[in-house]
Image: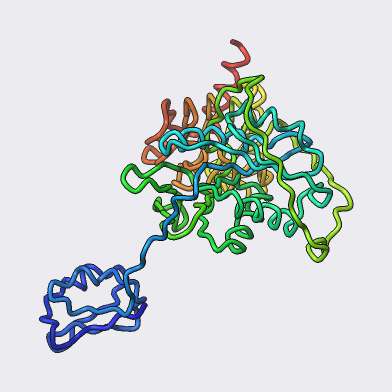
Amino acid sequence: MTIRIDQQSCDGCVRCLAACPYGGIDIADGKAVLNLRCTHCGTCLDACPQGAILSDAGTRRIPDFSEYRGVWVMAQQEAGGLHPVSLELLGKARELAEHLGQDVSALLLGDRVEPLVGALFAAGAQQVHLVEHPALAGYRTLPFSRAAAQVIQSQKPEILLVGATPMGRDLAPRLARRLGLGLTADCTGLEIDAQERILRQTRPAFGGNVMATIVGRYSRPQVATVRPGIMKPLPPEPGRQGRLLRHNVHIPSQDLRTTLLKTIQVPRSGVDLTSARVIVAGGRGVGNMAGFALLEELAGVLGAELGGTRVAYESGWIPHERQIGQTGVTVRPDLYVAVGLSGAIQHRAGMLDSRFIVAINKDRAAPIFDVADFALVGDFSKIVPAVISAAQEA
């Protein structure tokens, strides 16, 4: 889109200057003129009462998507079972589908994975689209993206939700490119717009400083990835039945460019943070490894898992899988003990759904206190030993 200003119509009212978010318009000789900061975004078009700002872009029409129906979840596997994010997304899919009056489906790809179908029905799927093929034994980008695209093209779902795991972050953009779709990554909120009946996808932007809500009006399905731990799974219903649909796919030999030789499960220390009920997390204020050793002792007496902020990870005080926040994992424990961390929005995005939050910080103005249920203002090196002593005596 190209923006231009009709100098004869412009009366220099300066309303376009206030509307431009980039400072891309100046006033020269009583007329508005574009400068080098103009991005031709079109924000100024509706601001001009004289109609002096013109664009060469025509009105874009929304296609007829009436044949697209259903909320789908990409079922991912982990250690021979279903990845928890698949069950979480099925819970959210049920909510979205109820607003639309449509069905919930899971798309399951793999080799000899039919035994997982029952767990998908129990988690809320009404239909499971099953694709079994030897080339899908273990995730590889090209075979999975081709197989998924063939099923999606033939079945035409309205919404597709993908867990933002390493597999999902690789597969979702491939599918979007292959099918010519939009994609909103790392969503923290999903809802149906009551008027347009489209998916409103909310995600952090600009380093977590703002929350952007994105809609996809011009393509179907609407595709979004969601990080594990964001959504809540429904209580499982063992024995629940649904409709199983099998699909045959063609995977050409040129897609088999890599061979999966071996899968190695990297051992993790402690419990996965996303399933921990109690977490002790530290930030910059903890200061060093000795400070984290004290937090580890506190975690031990509380039966908690140890986590931290991005600064703690980048300082080498915790491994990456222990990082909590926008660029780490999202957690929702019963008790979250935040020690020496300020509570920047990027970190709060990963722990805000904790049931109870206890904050320990010597800065009374720390943002973490805005979301804490209990606040302890003071030096953590004095408070934490006292808490440990009290817990041991209890």
Q: Which residue is situated farthest in the right direction here?
A: 261
Residue 190 place in picture, x, y as percent = 45, 43
Quadrant, the N terminus: bottom left
Q: Quadrant of residue 10?
A: bottom left
Q: Which residue is drawn at 64% across and 24% down?
A: 241
| Residue 294 seen in the current view | no
For residue 11, above or below residue 140: below
Residue 38 place in picture, x, y as percent = 33, 78
For residue 222, above or below residue 339: below
Drawn side of residue 63 relative to residue 181, left or right: left
Drawn side of residue 118 relative to residue 163, left or right: right
Work out whether residue 312 or residue 226 is closer to the camera in this orientation and state it: 226
Residue 32 place in picture, x, y as percent = 19, 82
Work out whether residue 190 or residue 149 is closer to the camera in this orientation and state it: 149
Q: Residue at x 59, y 48 (%)?
A: 155
Q: Residue at x 65, y 19 (%)?
A: 238
Q: Which residue is drawn at 32% across and 69% down?
A: 59
Work out whether residue 81 or residue 111 is closer to the camera in this orientation and state it: 111
